[in-house]
Image (cartoon, rainbow, N blue to C red):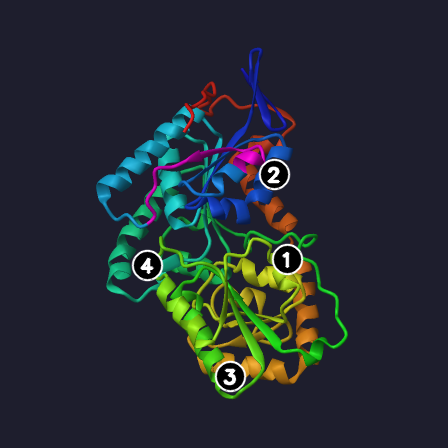
């Protein structure tokens, strides 16, 4: 007989915590986007294991008391033998650990985690796809060739009971349903990873603030499909008008993404005097407290965390009328300025409008903050994620109950990485 009490189970005299594996394509993602979820799971009594390729944030995750393991994963690999080998490695890892839930983030980690979970007999497999990514956004030949393979992999990963696909905006839900990529019953809509509204707080108005140069920020991975090119062209336009507007760029090139902007290109913009490049910024609340506008002219998003962090800080928002972005800034213009995709002239016009009307900057910022509090508080997102776990493993919603059909095994430790 297997008995369950909250998030623990015991067989005979042996008691173990329910175990969840969170798997992402970078340790940076886990640290910056999912650490609150990991903490909540730990507080609720789960044993939490974090998986990602090697990176500088892995040791930080361990310092926070989590088990983090390095995955032999090459994000840019298209070698079928390497990819199959990775899935088998993951399956062996999951079989040894015997978690009840594996939760993967981004398309590659989500699909591979679910496939490996099926092979290892993991009862609940959750795929979280934050936007359709390079394969579905890019117009280049490699992306088009990969799409049929990704579609087949998604169908294989998400088939059968115990699977759920979490998407971040209604547009992606419509795409997945119309393309019949997965069983519609597996789809769940949860808007983003949320924001800590106690950490990202509205900035105080400073006397004379309206007379200083307008400070505009684009904070994102430096990818062309984030609208970095359009941002620079808008900055060049307004610089040519001799407007006293400062354009800041925060983030690093993502060498694991084919759409990455080269470091050489970024440096050329800096030398031209068009933008100030801040590189990686670890203290985003502090940076956001010192700027006026967040611009994200992205082509498509899941639900952009940078925008909701800026919204929580009361910044005026400029973004595109694109999937994911329009969930944060509506077409009505009440909570920000919405512009067409790939339109640097519209972006320049929006910045010009805000530079001329500082009262509008404050008005839009307050509206953005209110929306962030109501819709994007991370506590809402985390609770909805736990609801998905409970749906897949109904026993999580019970205080005590039998569950004899799950493939449980004694947890076994792994050798040090």
Give the mark toward the camera: 1 or 2: 1
Q: Earlier in the sequence, mark 4 or mark 3?
A: 3
Q: CA distance from mark 4 to mark 3?
A: 30 Å
Residue in view at x 36 percent, y 35 percent: 116
> What residue does disc 3 label?
238
Q: CA distance from mark 1 to mark 4?
A: 29 Å
**Residue 67 horizontal/vertical position (percent):** 51, 31
42 displayed left or right of 156: right
Q: CA distance from mark 2 to mark 4?
A: 33 Å
Look at the numbered disc 1 and give the secondary structure of its residue.
helix
> What residue does disc 1 label?
285
Give the mark toward the camera: 2 or 4: 4
> What residue does disc 2 label?
39
Look at the numbered disc 4 and give the secondary structure of its residue.
loop
**Residue 98 horizontal/vertical position (percent):** 45, 26
Residue 68 included in the magenta stretch of the image: yes
**Residue 313 horizontal/vertical position (percent):** 66, 62
Q: Are marks 4 and 3 in contact (CB under 8 Å)?
A: no
Asked if residue 159 shows in the view, the reply is: no
Q: What label does residue 331 carry, if any?
A: none
Q: Earlier in the sequence, mark 2 or mark 4?
A: 2
Judge the density around disc 1: few (<14), some (14-19), many (≥20) Cα neighbours within 10 Å: some
Judge the density around disc 4: few (<14), some (14-19), many (≥20) Cα neighbours within 10 Å: some
Q: Which residues are magenta?
A: 61-75
183 displayed left or right of 238: left
| Screen quadrant of the C terminus | top left
> What residue does disc 4 label?
258
Q: CA distance from mark 3 to mark 1?
A: 27 Å
Q: Earlier in the sequence, mark 1 or mark 2?
A: 2
Look at the numbered disc 2 and give the secondary structure of its residue.
helix
């Amino acid at each position: 007989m297997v008995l369950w009490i909250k998030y623990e189970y015991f067989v005979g005299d042996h008691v173990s915590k329910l175990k969840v594996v969170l798997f992402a394509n970078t340790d940076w993602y886990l640290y910056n986007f999912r650490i609150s979820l990991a903490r909540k799971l730990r507080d609720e009594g789960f044993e939490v294991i974090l998986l990602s390729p090697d990176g500088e944030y892995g040791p930080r995750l361990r310092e926070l008391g989590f088990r983090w393991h390095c995955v032999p994963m090459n994000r840019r690999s298209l070698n079928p033998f390497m990819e199959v080998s990775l899935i088998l490695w993951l399956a062996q890892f999951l079989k040894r650990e015997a978690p009840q839930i594996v939760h993967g983030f981004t398309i590659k980690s989500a699909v591979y985690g679910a496939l490996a979970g099926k092979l290892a007999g993991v009862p609940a497999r959750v795929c979280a796809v934050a936007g359709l990514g390079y394969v579905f956004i890019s117009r280049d030949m490699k992306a088009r060739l990969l799409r049929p393979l990704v579609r087949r992999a998604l169908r294989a990963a998400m088939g059968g009971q115990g699977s759920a696909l979490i998407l971040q905006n209604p547009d992606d839900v419509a795409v997945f349903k119309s393309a019949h990529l997965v069983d519609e019953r597996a789809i769940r809509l949860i808007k983003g990873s949320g924001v800590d509204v106690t950490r990202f707080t509205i900035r105080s108005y400073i006397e004379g603030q309206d007379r200083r140069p307008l400070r505009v920020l684009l904070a994102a991975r430096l990818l062309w499909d984030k609208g970095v090119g359009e941002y620079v062209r808008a900055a060049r336009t307004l610089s040519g008008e001799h407007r006293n507007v400062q354009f800041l760029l925060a983030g690093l090139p993502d060498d694991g993404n084919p759409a990455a902007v080269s470091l050489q290109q970024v440096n050329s913009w800096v030398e031209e005097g068009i933008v100030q490049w801040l590189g990686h910024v670890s203290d985003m609340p502090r940076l956001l407290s010192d700027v006026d506008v967040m611009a994200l002219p992205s082509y498509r998003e899941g639900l952009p965390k940078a925008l909701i962090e800026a919204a929580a800080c009361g910044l005026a928002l400029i973004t595109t009328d694109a999937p994911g972005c329009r969930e944060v800034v509506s077409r009505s213009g009440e909570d920000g300025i919405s512009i067409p995709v790939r339109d640097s002239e519209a972006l320049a016009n929006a910045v010009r409008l805000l530079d001329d009307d500082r009262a509008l900057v404050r008005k839009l910022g307050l509206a953005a903050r209110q929306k962030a509090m109501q819709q994007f508080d991370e506590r809402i997102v985390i609770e909805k994620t736990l609801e998905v776990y409970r749906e897949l493993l109904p026993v999580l919603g019970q205080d005590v109950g039998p569950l004899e059909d799950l493939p449980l095994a004694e947890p076994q430790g792994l050798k040090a990485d």
